[in-house]
Amino acid sequence: MDIRAIDLYRLEVPLHTPFKTAVREVNSAQSIVVAIHTDDGSCGWGAAPATAKVTGETLDTIAGVIRDPLSALLIGRPLEDFNGLLDTLHGGIEGNYSAKAALEIALYDLRARSLGVPLYKLFGGDGSPLQTDLTISVNPPKKMVTDASHAVANGYRILKLKVGNDVAEDLERITAVHAAVGDGIQLRLDINQGWSAKETVRALAILEKRDIVPELLEQPVPAEDIAGLRYIRERVAAPVMADESVFSPMQTIRLLEQGAADIINIKLMKAGGLSRALLIAQIARLYGAECMMGCMLETSISAAAAAHLTSAFGAGIQKIDLDAPGLCQYDAVTGATRFDGPSIELNHSPGLGIEGPGHIRGLTAI
Ligand SMILES: C[C@H](N)C(=O)N[C@H](CCC(=O)O)C(=O)O
Ligand SMILES: [Mg+2]
């Protein structure tokens, strides 16, 4: 079964409410979608969002490197040489991890389809459903309280609060949300690189005095400040999670060797797809570190791929932040993995279960 063609599309899904972090604000989830066709008429689907502030990639660069050089490296090759295809893909160009992730997801989808199994079975999973947290965008405290209360009313038990603009204001945000939702709801704090190491330690001491103990602290300091992560980890009770500081398996090893994180936030879009994400999870397990499966602001095509891997990896990925489809006004994909509030129900049909372009709302060929 040889790869015959790779088609590209754009997909845009409006959000319920603007997504705001310490580094960016967007109103829709935008992705490049890839369809890899084989000569027996099969098609595998993948997608990648543009997160230029984190990965350095835009929709144009993702589409551009998929067109040249990556497509030409894959077209004409047999799917049966699967590991060879992955090596070619990753060796074909430096960086460009989201573009590679889109292609990898489509290759894995094709492979699972060719074997007649859902994607999770390729990774040895049983397809158990998952529960995700929900991200609350950074806003004035009153708005965050409204959004958090709405999330809790919709069944979410874990909230990820975006902060990182101004420490004093952030403390008011966190305190207000905690007072509104109570101790029964776990709060993850994603600072998106917005504080310094010393500010983080001081902020956590203040929260402790207010009896607020976050479940975890995500990327409090700039990505390159590995010493800062370690400084915080040695001084605060809450576990420290690395996000923007860790893209690759090798960075995971370096970070854990330096004792700079308790938890690794794995994202397909940082790792370059499923194979590297799995490797990161395995490395973390060897070091006794926990993992979160996270996502960018992406649509359900790529979030579903991450969910399949997470479900299969079982207790090795303890935390889940695959909420992006739930932030969208509608799920662009019908008849596949279902994102229903906090619950993620994997498809049990072959691959990712996407039946064709007619089952993806709003696709535009490019
Ligand atoms: C959407 C997900 N829950 C999330 O918060 N991801 C962000 C980055 C998303 C983006 O900017 O597209 C994160 O974990 O930092
Ligand atoms: Mg993060």
Image: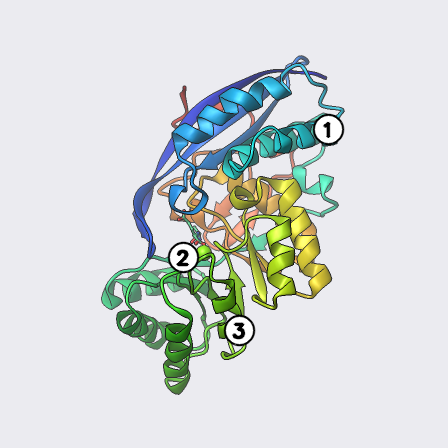
Q: Position of residue 73 (x, y in %)?
A: 62, 20
Residue drawn at x 40%, y 31% is 59
Judge by depth and name the residue closer to the eye, 232 or 161.
232
Query: Which image quarter: residue 104?
Result: top right
Residue hosting label 3: 233
Residue hosting label 2: 135
Q: Report the Cα–Cα distance between label 1 and label 3.
A: 40 Å
Q: Report the Cα–Cα distance between label 3 and label 2.
A: 23 Å
- Residue 350 seen from this side: no
Q: Position of residue 240 (x, y in %)?
A: 52, 68
In the image, what residue type sits under mark 2?
A: Thr
Residue drawn at x 37%, y 77% is 203
Residue drawn at x 42%, y 59% is 222
Dot 2 or dot 1, earlier in sequence: 1
- Asked if the residue at tag 1 contacts the one at tag 2, i.e. Cβ–Cβ closer than 8 Å, the answer is no
Label 2 secondary element: strand
In the image, what residue type sits under mark 3?
A: Arg
Compared with 13, 154 (above or below) is below
Q: Position of residue 176 (x, y in %)?
A: 30, 74
Left or right placement of residue 211 versus residue 38 in this view = left
Disc 3: CA contacts within 10 A as few (<14), some (14-19) or many (>=20): many
Q: Nearer the viewer, mark 2 or mark 1?
A: 1
- Asked if the residue at tag 3 contacts the one at tag 1, i.e. Cβ–Cβ closer than 8 Å, the answer is no
Judge by depth and name the residue closer to the eye, 338 or 169.
169
Q: Is mark 2 within 8 Å of ligand 1?
A: yes
Q: Is mark 1 within 8 Å of ligand 1?
A: no
Residue drawn at x 48%, y 40% is 300
Residue hosting label 1: 84
Disc 2: CA contacts within 10 A as few (<14), some (14-19) or many (>=20): many
Judge by depth and name the residue closer to the eye, 276 or 15.
276
- Asked if the residue at tag 2 contacts the one at tag 3, i.e. Cβ–Cβ closer than 8 Å, the answer is no
Label 1 secondary element: helix
